[in-house]
Amino acid sequence: MANLNNQNYCLQKELEAFIESDEAVRQGLDRKVKVDTIRHKVDDVIRRSEAEVEERILEQKSRRVHAEHARAAHDADRAAAERAALHHAAMAGRYEPVPVPGRVVTRSANHYSPARHEAYVARTAWRPEEVQVRTFSHEYRPATEGAAATR
């Protein structure tokens, strides 16, 4: 009986080995699994390449939009500079005093600007010659030399 059990055991092991090799051959010949595996690999590659293409398209669009914004800003700045130049050219004559023969034109402190080329001329208030002027030393002196001579 032990001999039959031993033969049965050996046949069972051999049968399991055949079944395993049959499964291996069946899996190798099973085209559906191979096709599915290949499809998954191809789909993955396609998805990655589509993502790269979309990324590059978005990058180009953002570069194009940035270039358009920069161009528009440059055009707006140039137009503003042109408008300012036209405005300054048109307004230049309005701020210059009209020359009157025999009169010295001076500027008040409100019109003084360090950007002007001509020197600032100090203005003194007009007073009659006989009026005394108070100085910073709190002394009274005649307003002009002629007033002192008349006293």
Image (cartoon, rainbow, N blue to C red):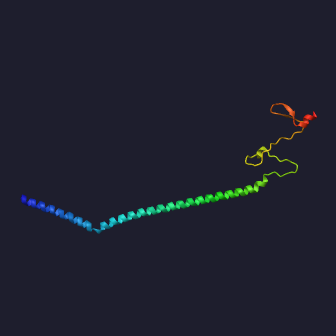
The one nearer the camera, 35 or 67, is 67
Residue 78 placement, left or right of 19: right
Image quarter in which the C terminus is found: top right
User: Is residue 84 positioned above or below 28 on the image?
Assistant: above
User: Is residue 135 positioned above or below 112 on the image?
Assistant: above
Instruction: Say which residue appears at 92% left-offset and 35% top-offset.
Output: 149
Residue extending farthest left: 1
Give residue 16's quadrant in the image.
bottom left
The one nearer the camera, 107 or 35, is 107
- Residue 57, position in %: x, y? 49, 63
- Residue 94, position in %: x, y? 79, 53
Task: Count up the numbered dots.
Answer: 0
The one nearer the camera, 86 or 45, is 86
User: Is residue 121 positioned above or below 84 on the image?
Assistant: above
Instruction: Say which residue appears at 24% left-offset and 67% top-offset.
Output: 26
Residue 105 placement, left or right of 17: right
- Residue 87, position in %: x, y? 73, 56
Image quarter in which the N terminus is found: bottom left
- Residue 146, position in %: x, y? 91, 37
Instruction: Say which residue appears at 38% left-offset and 65% top-offset.
Output: 43
User: Is residue 143 positioned above or below 84 on the image?
Assistant: above
